[in-house]
Amino acid sequence: MTAVLPSSFTVRPPSKEDAQALLELVSDYNTSVIGFADYTLEDAEDELTEPGFTAETDGWLVFDGDRLVGYGAVFGKGDHRQLDLDVVTADLAVETYLLERILRRAAEFAVQYGHSSVQLDGGNYQVDAARRDRFAGYGFEPGTTFHRMRIDHAEPVAVPEVPAGVTVRRGAPDEASQRAGHAVLNESFEGQFGFTPRSFEEWHAAQENFSAFDWSQLTLLELDGEVVAIRSCTSQFVGDENCGYIGRLGVLDKARGKGLAKFLLRDQFALDAAAGRAGTILHVDTNNPTPALGVYLSVGMQPTLVMEVLRREVTAA
């Protein structure tokens, strides 16, 4: 299959200077599907400057004259066994063009990193059944489903009691704390869908690049002198929904069953409410091997949006 664009269309790699145009493209698509933008200028800038993303080979902007009509990109982390794609366009010919290039680049990554094949994942709002069906025509199958969970803070939230024997370390301003958090993150998320372990250096660079994050938003729990749990929050939902966001919450196996996850959740609810946030948001994989969804429901969070991951295996070029 080889898609051919109209002769008036042009294609070039993206750059940070294209963030505003990308924001408008993504916002238009999202609004047409779910009724709101669900994307910010900071999101666009962060995506276009993601460490490890090489725009010249891994990203494409499609223009009809001066109007941006399509965006495609492929992102890899760690050993690049698992890749993420992003395709946004309302033009089906452009969608085909971008998917072909992403599939080709994924096959090249497989060769580059010594894999016989790689997993390529793309996100989709579950209500967009037509897009899911089109991706199925390219060999993509359902991978998993994520729920966006939210709890509203109409009133002040009580500060929870710290579990017995636990020390709360708020913020990670030094490398030792950051390394401890990174180690817990990799161990606690091992085996979960779409999670790729990264070296400390790669993870640290990504955190530093993320405009909605600073190290004061990383909280660690210590038990018997060992860091056993992590909560990493960002401000990415503050501008559009006035909500705090829990990006990662992980507890080591040996420390589960002690109420640490519920404490970290309720503690963040109290912090967000005290800061005047309307609520707290997080995403949960409904196929998570840990009973995470039940924990979030038990503390009052409710699903507000359903997203799915579509996956395809791509063999080496």
Image (cartoon, helix red, strand yellow):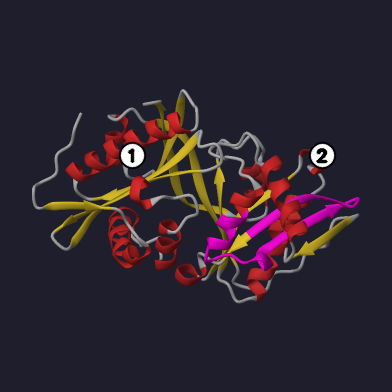
Q: Which residues are magenta?
A: 204-232
Amino acid type, residue under disc 2 in the picture = Lys
Choose between 218 and 19: the one closer to the eye: 19
Q: Residue at x 71, y 40 (%)?
A: 187
Of the image marks 1 and 2, the number of the one nearer the N terminus: 1
Mark 2 is surrounded, within 10 Å at the Cα level, by few (under 14), some (14 to 19) or many (20 or more) other residues, namely: few
Q: Quadrant of the C terminus?
A: top left
- Can I make out residue 70 in this image? yes
Indicate the amino acid at tag 1. Answer: Ile
Q: Would you say residue 71 sits in the magenta stretch?
A: no
Distance of label 1 from label 2 (alpha carbons): 40 Å
Q: Residues within 10 Å of mark 1 (few under 14, many from 20)?
A: many
Q: Residue at x 44, y 59 (%)?
A: 49
Element carrying mark 2: helix
Please, is residue 123 above or below residue 34 in the view? above
Up/down of 259 relative to 316, above or below: below
Residue 17, percent across and down? 34, 67
**Relative to residue 236, is residue 78 depicted above or below?**
above
* Coordinates of residue 117 in the picture (x, y in percent): 45, 25
| Residue pointed to by mark 2 | 254
- At mark 1, the secondary structure is helix
Answer with left or right where residue 227 lies relative to residue 189: right
Q: On the image, numbered disc 1 is attached to which residue?
A: 102
